[in-house]
Image: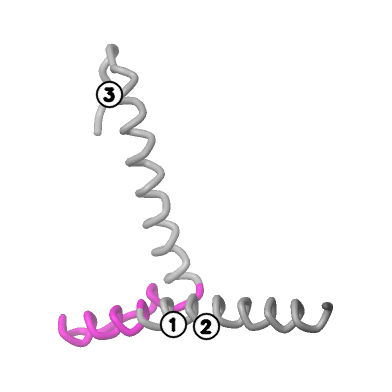
Amino acid sequence: MGRTPKNITPEKKKQNRLDESYRNVIEGKFGQGKRRFGLNKIMSKLSNTAESSIAIAFLVMNLNTIVKKIFHLTFYLFLKNRLF
């Protein structure tokens, strides 16, 4: 954080870009959770119930990804067998 130094080595620049791209993926997943899976609507008062709600939301996000991949694979195999 703060002002970047004037003399940065190319290796350090490359590492900074990789770190930023990794953070972008994580922040994007949190944004998706807030938009589509209700992570922004959790209003639990106890920490245990809030943690459970967040864990369930991420479980549903992961299950959604798995179901999408299975559907695409099934659809691809169906079309592949159907066309030839």
Q: Nearer the viewer, residue 39 or 64?
A: 64
Q: CA distance from mark 1 to mark 3?
A: 41 Å
Q: Residue at x 25, y 29 (%)?
A: 2
Front in this rendered view, residue 45 or 9: 9
How far apart are labels 3 and 2 at the CA level? 44 Å
Q: Mark 1 or mark 3: which comes first in sequence?
A: 3
Tell me the SS state at disc 3: loop
Mark number, residue 3: 3
Residue tagged by mark 2? Answer: 67
Quadrant containing the N terminus in the rendered view: top left
Q: Element at badge 1?
A: helix
Q: Residue furthest left?
A: 47
Q: Which residue is mark 1?
A: 63
Q: Position of residue 31 (x, y in %)?
A: 44, 63
Q: Which residues are magenta?
A: 36-58
Q: Quadrant of the C terminus?
A: bottom right
Report the mark closest to the observer, 3 or 2: 2
